[in-house]
Image (cartoon, rainbow, N blue to C red):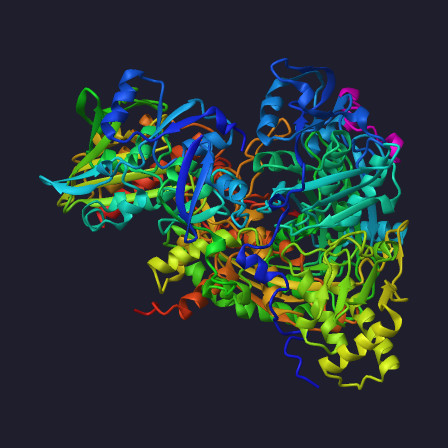
Amino acid sequence: MRSDVTEYELSAPATLQEMLSLLAAEPGKYTPIAGGTELMVALGVGRLQSRSLLSLQHFQELRFLREEDGHVVIGANTTFTDLRRSALIAEHLPLLAQSASWTGAIANQNRGTLGGNIVNASPAADNPPVLLVYGASITLISASGMRTLDYNDFHLGYKKTQLRADELVHSVRIPLAYQGYRQYIRKVGTRNALAISKIALAGIARTEGTRIAEIRLGAASLTDRPIRCLAAEKALTGASLAADSLEATLQAGRAALAMEAKPIDDIRSTARYRSAVAENLLEEFLRSLAE
Amino acid sequence: MEELIDGIGASPLRKEGRAKVLGAARYIDDLSLPDMWHGATVRSTIARGRIRNLHFGNEIDWSEYTVVSARDIPGLNTVAHLTNDHPCLASEYINHPDEPILLLAHPSKTALHHALKAITIEYDEYPGVFTIEESEQAVAAQDAERIIWDGSQWNATANCFKTYTMYSGEGEEVEAGLSRAFEEADYIVEGEYSTGAQEQLYIENNGVIAECFRDENGDVESVCVQGSMQCPYYLVHALELVFNLPEEKCRVIQVETGGAFGGKEDFPSVIGSHAALLAMKSGHPVKLVYDRAEDMAATTKRHPSRTRLRTAVSREGKLLGAEISVAIDGGAYSTLSPVVLSRATIHAPGPYHWPFLRVKSKAMATNVPPHGAFRGFGAPQSLFGLERHMDKIAKTIGISPEELRRKNFLATGDYTATGQPLVEEVDMQKLLTRALREASYHEKIARYAEENKTSPIKRGVGFAAFMHGTGFTGSGERRLNSQVHLELLPDGRPQILVSSTEFGQGTNTILCQAAASALHLPYDLVTIAQPDTSRVPNSGPTVASRTAMIVGKLVQRASEQMLHTLSSFAALPENHTSQQFLEAARRYLAEHGTLRESVRYEPPTKIYWDDELYRGDAYPGYAWAVYVAEVAVDTRTYSATVTRFDALQEVGRVMHPVLAKGQIEGGVAQGIGYALYEKCVWKNGHMANNQMTNYIMPTSADLPPIHVHFEEVPSIHGPNGAKGIGELPMDGPAPAILNAIENATGISFNAIPLLPEDIFERVHSLGHPHGGSRELDPNTDRDTRVEETIA
Amino acid sequence: MSKVQFLLNGQQQSVEVPPMKRLLDVLREDLRLTGTKEGCGEGECGACAVLMNGELVNSCLIPALQAEGTRLCTIEGVSTDGHLHPIQQCFLERGGAQCGICTPGMILATHQLLDKYPNPTMEQIQEGLGGNLCRCTGYMRIFESVQEAAALNPLAGK
């Protein structure tokens, strides 16, 4: 423990409205804390910058998971355990059930929240690639109201997002529109449990005959933020999976993905490895579509 | 006589197990003393240089703190190991990152964080060397700027802590024989193999609580340190030098220890001395417990190594001769490197007969924190090289790895490379046969060769054959001269007094079993005292797989002596009951007050070792093993995983099957980590990934089923035939796994840790000289370069 | 300072602590329950695991304030009147505890695992204990302890 906890303030506003008012009154003064699985690590190593924190962990109105107009709406306080236990998610959004199961281990999943994973905005985060391919929208809430964005536009750069200092994530909304899509996800981490991803790829695709009618790809640790792999999607949309053109399709997909990959060398892996494995995962997905 | 259901070979409950599962066992951080302060360490931020200036920020009221520097040390500024080159606190020169410079104490742990931030140190930085090669180059180039350790005052040479030359016979004869062997050989096979540093990663960090007592004149009278450790008497000897006190004034108590693996063998001498200095200067008991980041960055790791083999082999697969050179990276100070190197040297030839053999070895200095003891102690390093090389020889001459080994195994009656006759039964042929059968090795070789042709996942099997010497090397046990006491408690129950420590391996349990068996008493009636040097004799350090065999035997002898005493005194019948024993014991106590049996190590007269020639009986006994690994290499992620592991060993009589299995499985798990996961990322000598998040040890989801098999051949040296078991399982996994990966992929990897990134780079670089292919084809040999001497 | 109240091992507790103080330190320092261990301080090793409202959590990552109103169970609350819980008994008999430092967290993780899967598969065991690092055992004796505890569990097989 390398921090002096007496230097930190933490309170739990009685209501969400009260919390939003506090955030609005002095934007940037407070850091919201939910499950604590990121911020408490920072506290432990002596790197938690913000001295004033507001807990939102107790707001049950942000912990929900419901079906609404052909969508699933997931409150920001929903834990990974909640996601894993949901029959709705398991049935309609299997990739999200999978990515939730890869987020830390059981004890972290019992505490960590979807909202926290999103605003922490790590390029290696497990769940954002899935939200990207599922075409999620994100609703932010502040004292002045709510606004909803395409989740695609939410991440701006390394640990930078559209979230304003007076806002909280309210919920994420995902269309229930993927019956009949082929779905793929694979995380290549440092080990099988408690792993931070070196690279991860999520994908959904709809085929018509041997053609790829639609494909969406999302990746972690491929750039400075979670991304949709739009170049690869473009190169592959309409491409043929027929035996005589499969190799060309694979090469086109790999080449396009290579163009948009900007991975880094860090303590966990190398840029060369990340790029190559991302291409291999894409190929694995495409080959599965051809079967 | 009662049936002794808990005797040797049964699995009675671990002595301290109940407290552990209740969470009631007290480890050092669970304890506190009245008026206790907390300690912290100010460490260097550079690898090498000279301290120019220490600055204490004025935002801190320093009068609240105790600050200890090298000047406060009443005795020698050294940590006692084999040489005194290792300062307790750096006073002027810095030789590695995270080197301790100052110590702080304060009543509040939190206040220490503020103080640490307020101290700045200015340095004149000197160039450092960080690898064996850089250290060698500095010597070769006579680059005075990079001679980081001047050996002259320690009877050594520049940048080199220790060298050994070991011959399989008289030196000149062996040299002549080697010349002939390489001339006449059908094949000469060469290889170079390297291993990385490995963190012990006990889940409980290093920690101690120290007290200092003064006499009426205010002079330091004695010190007492309790903590997490393997070797209480090592710390006693360290304190004697630092405080210039006699042995009996330096008291050390081991408390429940949360894992050690060698990482609490030599290091407690450092942290224990530090805490005692703080206690001395502050006038308070001081607790010094590291957090994970500090423990990983500043404490010892396994020595990185490089092993080169040049071997002469006949067409039929007979080993004719070998020239082996082993180099280990010792870090900045000598510490235990000479003895680690010794074990690496003696294990380098493996369980094979070499008509002519020369092993030359050296421990080099680098500017990283000193490397130290870790389970296996040099043997995993040189055996990794050897057992990879054996597969390389087999591949080169075109016979199976199995056949090559069978043609060259040592057997009963043979002599080891140091000239030690194998008088006890050794049957490596039988072990190999059984291990391969248990693992379905042959069936899998055939099946995977077929399946791999079409699967993106390449599977393979491989094995390693090896041995591990039990106890201290050479004359070590004679020098240790270990002593064991056995006393009677007032109620008549016997109590074992030893300095041998429990840190999970089962010392408490097996020593009580040995005593119970010899005393014909139920296990539950035998107790063992907490290791407190004011009470227990020096039974030697708890290292080197020596506790079961050496200390166990002493306990057995003491027990026999006690039984004899009581039998003579009270005419105990031969098959006495517990009740009869306790009654006799209480009567004896009533008459004599106490009963203490004391025994000392007696070397079997046949054991002889010559330190000068480096020949003779290297170890009292050996454990023998064949380990088989099965792997899967995913060609999409370049990751290798172990999918099944079979560990067969001959460790003499198995004293406690549950504990023994636990030891083997735990060692294999660490070996799998060593081979495929655990990498220390160094940045100018500092461990950059000093967090559990980024130093990757296997989780429960990363390990395959580990199948443990024993062959039991009772040894004359241990209690009821037991031999050492602790380190053995560390030696075999890495070479077995890399042999399996070669079987799966056709690629020979010769360095560990082998991470997916390494496999990836190798697969892609293979493309260039060989015409470019992304495929992993096990049938293509891309590695072996053979010096064929056949005309 | 904040006043924080919770139900700990069946007893109501109230502490006055800095709100960001780690629950781990509240348990160990303020309440002197040292069975909960610190191994890494970053939620990686699971040695500090406790049950909060019946769910496994790492107490090193929980600010004291967030424990307000919760029901906590530490290793000290697993046994009753000195009688070992079947999980503890199995760890003791099957060699699931070696050095013992990961054992409290491992036993609580097993507790949650068997709550959820009374008859767990090997994969479920491996995942359920995936956040609890053990350096001694290689996990095999622990898996056996868990399987044995499941076999003794009256809920198993249902």
User: Can you say whether B470 is above or below B296 in the image?
Assistant: below
User: Can you say whether B104 is above or below B291 in the image?
Assistant: above
Is residue B746 visible to us here? yes
Tell me if residue A236 is in the magenta stretch: no
Q: Position of residue B43 (x, y in %)?
A: 67, 26
Rendered image quadrant of residue B211: top right
Tell me if residue B140 is in the magenta stretch: yes
Front residue of B463/A53: it is A53
Q: Classify the position of the N terminus of chain A by image quarter.
A: top right
- The residue drawn where x is 71% and y is 66% is B527
Q: Looking at the image, how many numbered discs can be counted on the residues?
A: 0
Rendered image quadrant of residue C99: bottom right
User: Can you say whether A230 is above or below B568 in the image?
Assistant: above
Q: Position of residue B768 (x, y in %)?
A: 48, 35
Is residue B721 visible to us here? no
Q: Position of residue B241 (x, y in %)?
A: 85, 37
- The residue drawn where x is 85% and y is 82% is B570
Front residue of B665/B391: it is B665
Question: In the image, is B731 to the left or to the right of C71?
Answer: right
Front residue of B224/A96: it is B224
Front residue of B193/A226: it is A226
Rendered image quadrant of residue B133: top right
Q: Position of residue B595 (x, y in %)?
A: 85, 69
Question: In the image, is A184 to the left or to the right of A192?
Answer: left
Q: Residue furthest left?
A: A69
Question: In the image, is B444 to the left or to the right of A171?
Answer: right
Question: In the image, is B420 to the left or to the right of A193?
Answer: right
Segment colored magenta: B139-155
